[in-house]
Amino acid sequence: MAKKRILSGMRPTGPLHLGNLHGALANWVEMQDSYDCFFFIADWHALTSDYENPGRISEYVREMMIDWLSTGLSPDRSTLFVQSHIKEHAELFLLLSMITPVPWLERNPTYKDQMDQIKNRDLSTFGFLGYPVLQAADIIMYKANGVPVGMDQVPHVEITREIARRFNYLYGEIFPEPEAILTKTSKILGIDRRKMSKSYDNAIYLSDSPDDIASKVSRMITDPQRARRSDPGDPEVCNVFEFLKTYADGETVENIGAACRGARIGCVECKKIMARNLIQALEPIREKRAEYKAHPGLVDDVISAGGDKARGVARQTMEAVRSVMRI
Ligand code: TRP
Ligand code: SF4
């Protein structure tokens, strides 16, 4: 039986951190075994909000591809590409915009939220309103059956389904209605215990050096109730412990948990152990990153071969679309 096709994308707005790794990327890597995978870097989507400062987008695109390759996405098992290299996305976006009622976009909860929250940029643009239409084009271009995304993206997949349904109704059944595949959220928080995010300045990046990691870990907030070394701690509310559960072996986790509850280990020492484990766990990623940085041609090759593969599919889709739309 043919594998089901999935597709997902990330906006290149900065280097990837552990939250991205455990929230999305690790899932994608795993899904390569069971799905026909398309993963792409949504650089046009980055422009919808950062159009005033596009300066670093192309640099982030490369860095993102390096992060992907270093964490186990493989061009032999997935189609990895950059959105803006496939001009067909722009054409399908345009055609879908003809059939998408504006109220669908104005009702979009992520649109309303961002308009309320982001005050330092003018987001009252056509492109920002049309964000989900471009996303719909990305998805249905490849006739994806599933879209692995976080909760925040579910409304966009819902709009995609509505647009696909409307297209099929108007012109004939071409597109499957894709389903959101919810990725489990990462339990790993930023060093200040808020959600890990570039904008909070609390993230540990895949590209961080061992020294960066050690210094960030040393600044991590632990069990806030534990004021002194002699106080028993509660590891279950401690982010350092959450990291240990991900990065240390079961025995270490158990021993440290017990020592923390019995006030037999201090947070400084505990963090040192965690940092050592984390640095070690990320070592293979750092090594691969260094290799790709030293051989930029390898990255160029992946980007161009993935682009060719994606374009082949996109061209076929667009021929069918133009034909049923009589264009
Ligand atoms: N909007 C997505 C995000 O911000 C990125 C994205 C663009 C995407 N096109 C997509 C995700 C298509 C899934 C499918 O995370
Ligand atoms: Fe957290 Fe470790 Fe301190 Fe316990 S000893 S509170 S697990 S950092």
Image: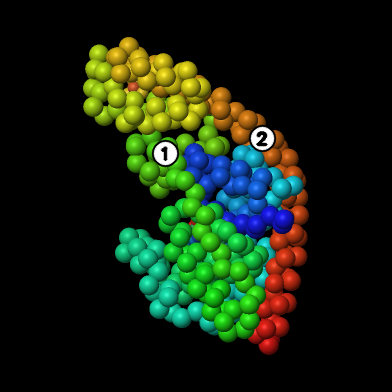
Instruction: Point out the residue furthest to the top here.
Output: 264
**Crowdedness near tag 2: few (<14), some (14–19) or many (≥20) residues, C-alpha within 10 Å:** some
Determine which quarter of the picture holds residue 104: bottom left
List x then y, in percent, for residue 174.
65, 75
Q: Residue furthest front?
A: 1
In the depicted structure, whether residue 27 falls above or below residue 146: above
Q: Is residue 103 above or below residue 24?
A: below
Q: How far apart are the alpha carbons under marks 1 and 2?
A: 25 Å
Residue 142 position (above or below residue 171): above
Element under disc 1? loop
Vertical order, 191 against 57 (above or below): above
Amino acid, disc 2: Lys
Quadrant housing residue 71: top right
Tag 2 secondary structure: helix
Q: Is residue 18 left or right of residue 259?
A: right
Q: Earlier in the sequence, mark 1 or mark 2?
A: 1
| Rendering quarter of residue 185 | top left
**Percent x, y of residue 171:** 62, 83
User: At label 1, which amino acid type do we have?
Assistant: Lys
Query: Is the N terminus in the top left, top right, bottom left or bottom right quadrant?
Result: bottom right
The residue that appears at 50% across and 41% down in the rendered structure is: 22
Q: Which residue is mark 1?
A: 187
Q: Which residue is mark 2?
A: 288
Residue 176 percent across, percent down from the top left = 60, 69
Residue, far bottom: 326
Q: Is residue 310 left or right of residue 186?
A: right
| Residue 210: % across, % down | 53, 27
* Other residues around mark 1 within 10 Å, as few (<14) / some (14–19) / many (≥20): some
